[in-house]
Image (cartoon, rainbow, N blue to C red):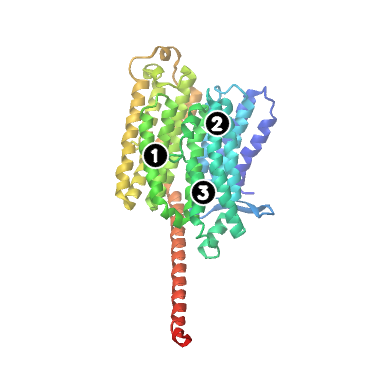
């Protein structure tokens, strides 16, 4: 057992222990969940040193048999791509525990147990190197989120939970079919072994590569979510409790983005390039559509949800630009979105706890009664719209620069999303925090307390740190992405060389047969 195994084991054991705590001991359950999640986060920080010692390769790799037949292995490892996503997951879980401290009063034990299970599922996806294990963790993350929305959500929570479940399960079935096909063809679920077999010509999937790519792609695109597969997201966000919205936006949406980089690009490089144009068209459509729909939303949560559709369009654009700087920006933007959008959902949740409304019309003049809450909201809004010196600017700039190397027209269209994000975020701030103080605001809205500061202060610090100190994060990301791009190029070249050699052999064979024809006659 190594450090990575411990990161997964702590919350898994915590989930089982939480289920055994008597339900009437609610405060004990809260402190237990906070302790387990904080311990997991502290232990996960130890991964940084291991990865930075060799960022382009997998660290703390553990590969051992799990199920003898059909050859399923517990194979995990962490590299520069997965490192910061794992830490993002472990960091936000204790934040969500604190956010829910007083808001969750029903079935407290089950709620916090599911939060720990969600941590296991999401972190497991980011480190799994066996496709079947990847699928198991993928499905584990689906179950707790379904119950978080369906039990502790708002009025239409059942509809939102079922819609979320059906969309995600549809994609999961397609992915499972592709995984089974690969196993039947190769005899292994191991991702690294599959990549090696394809690169060395021992596994030929050229005939089915496009279908396999599409099966994985639609599973990941639903999770991103990519336009027009995004329709479940506003409903799920609008009805989820605050902690559910934070984990959904900040972590679970990254599972799809991560799958595109970890599996789709290296495993199916030719199909990735062949389908890139229409995927980028959908990404740009999502950037513009998400921003336009966000501008007309009367509900704060739905506005932030549609902003996610727009922001994650930049991630997909960066991934399928197939440039080093674009891919680096896409991965960095995953982290940025997790911090800034997570903070927005927390702030909206705090407003809801005070005034019991998510409608923008029920707010105005909040800054006069809650100046510190307003200040943090403004800073987070500026980060979300990509203001220089804050985190989102770095990710969006890198994505646009990478896209410009591939096709400058993409940049012109995607830049509209940056302009529109300023429009809807500034308009939200103006309507909610300025103007005459609404009567319900004056009576119910108060400023941040100590517990709320404890959840928001680290997020604000990270927004600034990631905006001015991106060098702390990008080297490991860049090293891992470089390996992904190089392996994809090598596989494409190897396939082309194989085809050229085959054509050459066919021509030589035809040349040998041709002189014999007259004698035959």
Horizontal placement of 40 versus 453: left or right? right
Q: Is residue 328 visible?
A: no
Per the rendering, the mark at residue 216 is: 3
Rounded to the nearest angstrom, the CA distance separating label 2 from label 1 is 23 Å
Q: Earlier in the sequence, mark 2 or mark 3?
A: 2
Q: Nearer the viewer, residue 462 or 92?
A: 92
Residue annotated with mark 1 = 286
Marks 2/1 in contact by CB < 8 Å: the verdict is no
Residue at image x 51%, y 51%? 263
Residue 26 drawn at (x, y percent): 63, 23
Q: Secondary structure at mark 1?
A: helix
Residue 9 drawn at (x, y percent): 63, 42
Q: Is residue 433 above or below residue 327?
A: above
Q: Nearer the viewer, residue 82 or 422?
A: 422
Residue annotated with mark 2 = 161
| Crowd class of label 2 (few under 14; some 14 to 19; many from 20; radius 10 Å) | many
Rounded to the nearest angstrom, the CA distance separating label 3 from label 1 is 20 Å
Marks 2/3 in contact by CB < 8 Å: the verdict is no
Residue 399 drawn at (x, y percent): 37, 46
Q: Secondary structure at mark 2?
A: helix
| Crowd class of label 1 (few under 14; some 14 to 19; many from 20; radius 10 Å) | many
Q: Secondary structure at mark 3?
A: helix
Residue at image x 51%, y 24%? 451
Q: Earlier in the sequence, mark 3 or mark 1?
A: 3
Q: Earlier in the sequence, mark 2 or mark 1?
A: 2
């Amino acid at each position: 057992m190594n450090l990575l195994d411990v990161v997964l084991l702590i919350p898994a054991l915590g989930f089982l222990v939480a289920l055994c705590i008597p339900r009437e001991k609610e405060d004990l359950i809260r402190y237990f969940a906070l302790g387990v999640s904080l311990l997991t986060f502290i232990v996960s920080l130890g991964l940084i040193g291991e990865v930075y010692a060799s960022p382009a390769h997998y660290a703390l790799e553990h590969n051992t048999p799990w199920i003898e037949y059909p050859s399923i292995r517990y194979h995990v490892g962490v590299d520069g791509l997965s490192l910061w996503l794992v830490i993002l997951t472990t960091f936000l879980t204790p934040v969500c525990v604190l956010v829910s401290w007083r808001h969750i009063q029903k079935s407290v034990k089950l709620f916090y147990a599911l939060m720990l299970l969600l941590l296991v599922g999401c972190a497991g996806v980011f480190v799994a190197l066996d496709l079947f294990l990847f699928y198991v963790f993928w499905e584990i993350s689906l179950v707790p989120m379904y119950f978080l929305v369906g039990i502790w959500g708002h009025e239409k929570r059942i509809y939102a939970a079922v819609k979320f479940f059906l969309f995600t399960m549809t994609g999961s079935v397609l992915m499972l079919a592709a995984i089974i096909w690969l196993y039947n063809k190769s005899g292994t679920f191991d991702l690294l072994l599959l990549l090696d077999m394809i690169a060395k010509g021992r596994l030929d999937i050229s005939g089915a590569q496009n279908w396999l790519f599409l099966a994985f792609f639609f599973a990941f695109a639903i999770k991103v979510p990519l336009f027009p597969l995004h329709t479940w997201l506003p409903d799920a966000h609008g009805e989820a409790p605050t902690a559910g919205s934070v984990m959904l936006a900040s972590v679970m949406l990254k599972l799809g983005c991560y799958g595109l980089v970890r599996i789709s690009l290296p495993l199916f490089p030719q199909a990735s390039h062949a389908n890139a144009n229409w995927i980028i068209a959908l990404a740009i459509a999502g950037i513009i559509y998400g921003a336009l729909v966000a501008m007309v939303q009367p509900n704060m949560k739905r506005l932030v949800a549609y902003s996610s559709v727009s922001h994650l369009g930049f991630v997909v654009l960066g991934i399928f630009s197939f440039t080093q700087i674009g891919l680096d920006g896409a991965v960095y933007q995953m982290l940025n979105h997790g911090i800034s959008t997570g903070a927005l959902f927390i702030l909206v949740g705090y407003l809801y706890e005070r005034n019991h409304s998510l409608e923008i019309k029920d707010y105005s003049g909040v800054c006069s009664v809650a100046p510190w809450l307003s200040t943090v909201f403004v800073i987070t809004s500026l980060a979300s719209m990509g203001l220089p010196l804050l985190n989102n600017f770095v990710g969006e700039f890198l994505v646009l620069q990478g896209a410009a190397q591939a096709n400058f027209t993409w940049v012109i269209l995607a830049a509209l999303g940056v302009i529109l994000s300023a429009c809807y975020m500034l308009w939200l701030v103006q309507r909610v925090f300025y103007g005459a103080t609404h009567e319900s605001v004056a009576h119910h809205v108060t400023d941040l307390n100590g517990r709320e500061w404890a959840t928001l202060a680290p997020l604000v610090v990270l927004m600034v740190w990631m905006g001015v100190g991106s060098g702390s994060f990008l080297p490991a990301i860049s090293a891992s992405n470089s390996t992904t791009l190089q392996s994809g190029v090598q596989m494409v070249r190897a396939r082309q060389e194989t085809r050229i050699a085959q054509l050459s052999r066919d021509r030589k064979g035809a040349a040998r047969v041709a002189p014999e024809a007259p004698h035959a006659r």
